[in-house]
Image: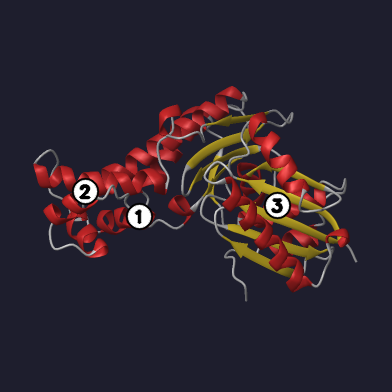
Amino acid sequence: MKYYLGVDGGGSKTYTLIVDEQGAIVGKGHSGNGNHQIDYETAKANIGESVEMALTQAGLKREQIEFAYFGLAGADREIDYGILRPMIAELGFPRHEINCDTMIALRAGTDRPYGVVLICGTGSNSAGVSPEGQFYQCGGFTYMFGDFGGGGTLCVEVFRTVIRAWDGRERSTLLTQLVLDDLGYANVQEMFDDYLDHNKVPPLRLAKLLFQAAKEGDEVAADILRMQGIELGKSAKAVIRRLVMESLTFDVVLAGSIVTRGEGDFIHKCIREAVQEVAPSARVVTLEVEPVVGAVWLAIEATGIELPRAVYERLRGVAEFSLA
C-alpha cells in the first residue's frame, strides 16, 4: 500500500492529512500558525507537530510516505524557499515538494489544471496558472505592498470604524455595540483608552461581526465588505490579464474563511462582476473542500501518475477538517 501526505500551513492553523492509494484517510494532524513570515520558530514547531500527529495516528514512518506535499503560506519568493527548503528537509521525508498555499487551494477547488484562486482568510492573496503552466501571484505581501483584506485587515477596519463613528467622522453603526459586547467594554471611551494605553491590537474574530451587522442592514459594515470584494476583484482581473486568460473557460476559486464562511453576497457579488468584465466565460466558485485535500492530490500527481478518479471523488467530501 502506498501513502501520500499533504500539509496546509496557514497564518492561523496547520493541517496534515495522510491517505492511502485508494483515498482512504489514515492520519490527521493539526496545529497553529505555519507561516514562517509570522514567526519562524513557531511555524517550524507547528508544522512538525501537525505532521507527527498524523504519522502517529496512521502508524506510519516517514520512509513509508510515497510523497509529501507542503502548501505553505509565505512560500512566495526565492528568499522564502531558501528558508523553507531546509526547514522541510529536516522533517525527513525522502520525496517532498513545497509550494505556496494558493496552489493547494486552487487544486482543491477545480478539476482543471489551470485557473485562478483568491484567498481571503487571515490575510489575502491571489494567484493563477495558465493552460501552458505559467504561474503568476498578485499580492500576499501586506497592506504596504498593495494588499487589502483578510481578517488581519478587516478586524482593524471594524475597530477603527467604531472609533470613527464615536468621534463623529463616520455614520453610526451597529458595529459599535457588537464590538463593545464582544470585547467586554461599557462604552467606546473605555475601549479607546484601554487599547491606546496598552498598545492592544483588535482580535481577528472581530471580522465576523461585519457579516452580522451587514445582515441586519448596517450599511457601514456592508460598505467594508464591498470594499473587500472590490479589492479581490481587482486582484482577479490582474491575474487573468497577466496570464492572458480573458477568452478562456476556467474557475476562479474563492478560498479562506472570509469568503467561504462569511454570510451574505456582499463580497462575492463584487468579485463576480469584476471577473465577468474581463473573462465572461470564467466561473467564480467557492471552495467546498479543505485546501489540505488539494495538497494530497498534488502529492499523488507529483509521483507522475494521474489522480485516480476514485480517489478524487472519495476526498471531495472532506469539506471540514476535524480530528474525528
Q: Residue 295 vs residue 247: left or right? A: right
Residue drawn at x 75%, y 63% as measured from the top left: 18
Q: Outermost residue, bottom direction? A: 324
The three-letter amino acid code for the residue at tag 2 is Asp
Which dot, 2 or 3, sits closer to the camera?
2
Q: Residue at x 66, y 65 (%)?
A: 29
| Residue at x 67% of width, y 29% of height | 78
Amino acid at dot 3: Ala
The answer, for residue 290, to whether it is visible in the render is yes
Residue 197, label in figure: 2
User: Marks 1 and 2, Cα distance to the nearest angstrom?
Assistant: 17 Å
Q: Mark 1 points at which residue?
A: 203
Q: Do the residues labelled 1 and 2 touch (CB within 8 Å)?
A: no
Mark closer to the chain start, 2 or 3: 2
Rendered location of residue 147, percent (x, y): 44, 33
Crowdedness near tag 2: few (<14), some (14–19) or many (≥20) residues, C-alpha within 10 Å: few
Mark 3 burial class by Cα count in 10 Å: few <14, some 14-19, many 20+? many
Relative vertical location of residue 194 with respect to residue 161 in this rendering, above or below: below
Mark 1 or 3, nearer chain start: 1
In terms of depth relative to the viewer, which is nearer, 94 or 107? 94
Q: Position of residue 99 (x, y in %)?
A: 69, 41
Residue 279, image quadrant: top right
Name the foreground residue: 298 vs 36: 36
Of the two numbered discs 1 and 2 in the rendering, the one whose residue sits closer to the viewer: 2
Labels 1 and 3 touching (C-beta < 8 A): no
Going by the image, does 287 lie left or right of 107? left
